[in-house]
Each structure stands twice: as C-alpha cells, then as structure tokens.
Image: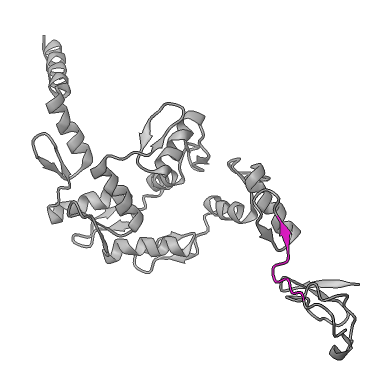
Amino acid sequence: MAVVLTNGHISCADCEKSFENCWGLGPHRCHEPEGNKPKDAKQMVIKEVGFQCLDCGKILTTPTSLNTHMRIHTGEKPYVCKECGKRFSGTGAYRYHLLIHNGVKPFKCQDCGKGFKQKYLLRKHMTVHSGERKYSCSQCDRQFAYRESLKLHLRTHSGARPFKCTVCGKDFADKGYLKTHLKIHNNQKNYHCGVCGQKFIRIGVLNVHLRSHTGERPYHCTVCDKQFARLDHLKNHQRTHTGEKPYTCTECGKSFTQSGDLTKHKRLHTGRGLLNVRNATNALSALLL
C-alpha cells in the first residue's frame, strides 16, 4: 500500500484517509464502507506511534528526528561553522550561530535602535530603558530585572560557589562563568574580529571590542544623556546620580560605588596596599637621586 506523510501523520496515498489514532484496527481498504468491518474486531487504539530511542526511551515522530536526538547520547556534532570552526549537533543551533557572523539582527529596539538576534533578547534589553526591577534582594536593597540575576546575586551573601573547575580547582558562583573559564585552559577563542583579527573567548567581549572600531555607544543615561559602549559602564555611571554604593567593606563598613574600588580598598587592610605605596615611593626617590 502506498502511503504519504501529511502534517506529521501517515495517510493512504489513494483515498487520503489518515491513520492518526487508528493503528491496530486491521488492514486498511480504500473506500470500504464502515459497516463491513467484522463485529468481533478488537478495537485497539495506539495513540503514541513513532520511533523510540533505545538509550532513554523517548519516542520521536520521524527517523530523521530520532537520528538528531541520538546525537545527545553519542556527542556527534556534524555541523561545522566555516568561520570559526565551532561544531553543532543540530541545524537549529547551527543556523542561530551563523547569525553571529553575518550580523543579522531582525529585532530592533524602538528607543535606541539596537538590534537583537532573538525576540527574548530584545525584551530583556527593554528593561534598560524602562528601569523595571521587580526582583528584590531580601538581604539588601538591591533590585534586579531578572530572577536569574537575583539568584546569582544571593550567592554574594551566602558565599556559595557550587561550580568547580576540574582543571585548576577554582570555584565559581555561576555555571556560565565556569564554562567561560574552561575556555582559558583549552585556549579556545572561537570569536575573531573581522577588522583587526583579534580573537576572543566570548561573543559578548567581541561585540564590545567591535564598538572600539565603530565608535558605537548604544547605552544612554536617562538623566544626563551621556552615552556608553557597555551596559555595566552605564550602571556604574547611574550611581553618580542615585548616590548608591552597593559594595561595602566587611572590615570597616566603608561603601563604594564600584567593586574595583572596594578591591583596592581591601588591600589597605591586608597590608598589600601600603606595600605598593612604599614601592612606588622608593621608585620615585630613586629617580630623583
């Protein structure tokens, strides 16, 4: 019997009758009246028909989807980016990655004109303009636009670093930080600048670097209209208007606007800061002699 695949279900090629939800009812005969079926025929209906993965039991609708699924178990990645050599197991992830190189960003911000590859990235970006921060930390006054950001921030209070590097033993608070760190050991720099050829571990770092060539500053301060190339630079600048100092020294209680300032301040308590001052003083005195 000749069959065709219509909307994901097998149908008879002659009478176009669909076999969806009717497997197990006996052989199909085209244009046969319903009354001709044997009265004692057992009405067995199998609703879930497909191709089962022998490793995990998942059922796929087509042999092609089963082959794609099996790459999860085998680790096969047959799709290779010609630009950077990165490999992918499926066509969806491969095509999405190609957007990085061809620069296609169909979703545009109506406020600043910045483009994004996916719609959800545009929605996340819009919080920069709206200032919406509906997730609040229960241990301090900080607020966040995303639940994931709050979850990561809470680890600064608890000190939790659940992700450990198996190469050097360094701990990280976020899985993404660990994934990026591992590229340092592998010397994996898949993203390169088409202008100067410099290579980078993360696409975000490459995008920031490209702004040094184009002069693009997509982040605008709503108070003084000052523009910045990086979002974290805008956030630090906004604290000059709000007076916020979220980084506090646990030794003396002094607060700072930026984490880097707190790091420098802590050296005064450990003695490293005084040592650097002495070294600089001695070096200056040697030059004057």
Residue at 61% x, 40% y is 85
Q: Quadrant of residue 286?
A: top left
Q: Is residue 286 above or below residue 225?
A: above
Identify the image quadrant of the N terminus. bottom right
Q: Is residue 108 left or right of residue 68?
A: left
Q: Nearer the viewer, residue 197 or 171?
A: 171
Q: Nearer the viewer, residue 103 or 24?
A: 24
User: Residue 168 location in percent, x, y?
Assistant: 42, 26
**Residue 177 colored in magenta in the image:** no
Q: Is residue 160 left or right of residue 289?
A: right
Residue 188 in view here: yes
Q: Quadrant of residue 145?
A: bottom left
Residue 76 in view here: no
Q: Is residue 86 above or below residue 109?
A: above
Q: Nearer the viewer, residue 91 or 63?
A: 63
Q: Nearer the viewer, residue 54 or 63?
A: 54
User: Residue 266 location in percent, x, y?
Assistant: 16, 31
**Residue 47 colored in magenta in the image:** yes
Tell me the magenta residue range. Answer: 44-52
Identify the image quadrant of the C terminus. top left
Query: Looking at the magenta stretch, what is its main secondary structure?
Result: loop
Number of marks present in the image shown = 0
Residue at 76% x, 74% y is 44
User: Residue 242 location in percent, x, y?
Assistant: 14, 56
